[in-house]
Image (tube, coloured by chain):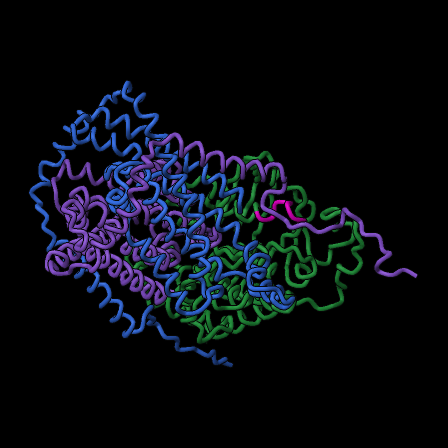
Amino acid sequence: MSEKTVVHDYPDVWQRFSPRQTLIRFIWYVGVVFVAVWALSTLDISWFYFLDAHLQVKDLAVRMWPPNLEFARRLVAPLIETIHIATLGTIITFVIAFPIAFLAARNTTINRFTWFIGRFILVGSRSVNTVVWGLLFVAIFGPGPLAGIWAIAFRSIGFVGKLVAEAIEEIDPGAVEAVESTGASRLQVLLIGILPQVLPVIYGTLVYRWDINIRESTVLGFVVAGGIGILLYSSINQFLWREVTVTLMMVFCVVLASEFLSAKIRHRIS
Amino acid sequence: MNTAAEKHIDPAQQWHQIRMIENPLIRHSLALLVLLYIFWSMLSINVDWGRFLLGLPRAANIVARMLPPDFSRWELLIRGMLESVQMALAASFIGMILAVPIGICASSNIVPKPVYLMARAFIILSRTFHEIIVAIFFVKIFGFGPISGVLTLTISSTSFISKMLAEDIENMPPGQIEAIRATGAGFFKLLIYCISPQAMPRYLGVSIYRLDANIRHSTVIGIVGAGGIGQVLAASFSRYDYDFSLAILLSIIVLVFLGEFFSNWVRSRLR
Amino acid sequence: MLEVIALSKTYATGTMALDRVSFVVDQPQVVAIIGPSGAGKSTLIRCINRLVEPTSGKIIVDNTDVTAQGQRQLRKTRRQMGMIFQEYNLVERLTVMENLLSGRLGYVGFWKTYRRKFPKADVAAAFELLDRVGLSGYQDTRADSLSGGERQRVGISRALMQQPRLLLVDEPTASLDPKTSRQIMRLIVELAHERGTPALVNIHDVGLAQSFADRIIGLADGKIVFDGTAKEITAQVLTDIYGEEDWSTTIQKIQQSSDSAKGRQAWKQKNKIEREVAAE
């Protein structure tokens, strides 16, 4: 007796994307390539320069080595000043960004207008680079570390404020409700309901920004706003490449140390 | 009868707020240290207090000179902005491409140790020095103009995107990688079939964020001559054309704001 | 089919996970490996396809010494061993179909994989497997939107897409509820019997092992302390493996007809039909 075995007719074609999806993806690819090519081609780049670039690099490398270690002694004081600029700037940031962050968070701001103001201040602060703020403050306060401190502060407000505002918006609403239901005033709700949740984020972000600010402070001297940047800029302009090397080496050490320190502290906080 | 008033309150059970630093001695001495530091540092750096006091009315003066912003030289402004945008686009594009091999090599869970160490060393080195320093070097080698800017931004983009990519790959659940390896797939098939689909959304998101950041950075490297709107801005400051400076600053803020808007939109579409 | 000879593994921390384990699987049977956590079950399974490198010993699969192979040959050997994982280990962002086809990665070239152009036979086999495990119509669903049981079915299908000569199954039901666990075990055993593929299955649930496995190996402290059928499991055996406990409720009555016997019946029946068809 022959047993009829059922033979299924299974499809043997399968595509990852539907034809429409494939078309859309293709259009995106073409668009991106088109934009990239346009950007590169209309830039006034003399490809000619690339031909002897490697010779130039070699020439520069030879002039930069060995580093002029005697010069290192003159670098200590400016480096300390650089650290001061970063630290003081970050401390000022703490004072100013704190209230602005509350204004810029949807759940703690007073009304739509204040929210917009808060957001606008933060975006404005972030859009302008530290060095550009430096330019501005040098024009106001004259050259020197004071301009640098305010430049650091004004740039950091946007960074810290944005992250803290996001943290405020993400807090557990249940805890806030609980405090509100006891009849506490707005300020009390802030202190007991919101602040304890947000404080670790504030400290962590400040330490993170301090680390970034150390890097930023090293170049503020380029616009004469204090710090090691002044010496670095003058060495470069005088073509004293071996002094440049030793300066960069010391900057490298300071930045590494601050990164290490900040990572350690942030680890302890979380 | 035991009323509430007669109940003895155990002092050990009183509630106190849990703080981040438990030991009150450490907490207070830390606060004291911060205050002492502020005093010491303010004294040790050269602050010209006379200039500072003069500065406040001076600030008012400058603000007055800044308003209203002067847009009359808008052709120069637009040309500078366009150059900045092009620099940012080109650098982001090249940076995205270069970040793929470097990011893969910097992931400890899929490549051998020596490769990993070399890639990580490159990333650390390129992130230590501020863009403006890198820009100066490129200006010395390639001269003034956007070419130095594109190269500078490419290096910072590459190191940033590859660092994020490596972190993403290292945080991937190891089970998926194990399973694909168990089917007999080699390294490259593992990349395109497991690593790539998992890392792609974040990779694209980070790249788009970097585009936005590059626009901001292009303004500052222009100050040392690496092209873009920064060069125009620095020139306006040095000529005391503060009203033109404000026009430029406002345009930069608007551009950055638009860039952020665009980048958030694309990133939300990618989810 | 599978010969494990004096397999040992000591980790870098000093723990000896396997201590000269030896056994042979020479027929298409489902072998359950039971034992407490840390007894070496996971290590044993992973040593066989060298996801974990053994410290010493030999593993011979179909007359090939797996332990002596280089990277290239090892990949070829791996593609013939299907592995099913406790945590399913699907590529989350890919669809069910793509996860199934990833079982063919060892057989398809690089560019075809990139463009997802798998051979027609593979695609047809994938659809057939989807039907068989009860996931018809799911081919374009993303893996991360599936339930635990559904994910494990995809995992099983992926392993079977490799058309393996050996199935390595690592605690397939540990993350599933009791009902789904039985469904999945039943599926694995049926499929293994249908295809005549031997399977090594790590299980921590002794009841499941007894219900579904043809043979049970007990592992304790990296050594084999029991190797026999479900009927031979006594309280003493369980004490040897796990330690002192009231085992009376764990051991199942022999009179209950076990599902593994049903599975073997189905396999014999299917083979009979095929033989009769072939004879026409």
Give the residues drawn in magenta, as a range: C36-42
Q: Is residue C45 left or right of residue A105?
A: right
Q: Residue at x 66, y 52 (%)?
A: C34
Chain letter of the blue region: A
- Please determine whether, in this image, residue A251 is positioned above or below residue C227: above
Q: Position of residue B42 (x, y in %)?
A: 40, 34
Picture colour for chain C: green
Q: Residue furthest top?
A: A70
Query: Is residue A268 or residue A109 the one in the foreground?
Result: A109
Q: Residue at x 51, y 81 (%)?
A: A1
| Total number of numbered discs in the rendering | 0
- Please determine whether, in this image, residue C198 is positioned above or below residue C20: below
- Please determine whether, in this image, residue A111 is positioned above or below residue C169: below
Q: Position of residue C184 (x, y in %)?
A: 58, 66
Query: Is residue B20 or residue C46 the one in the foreground?
Result: B20
Picture colour for chain B: purple
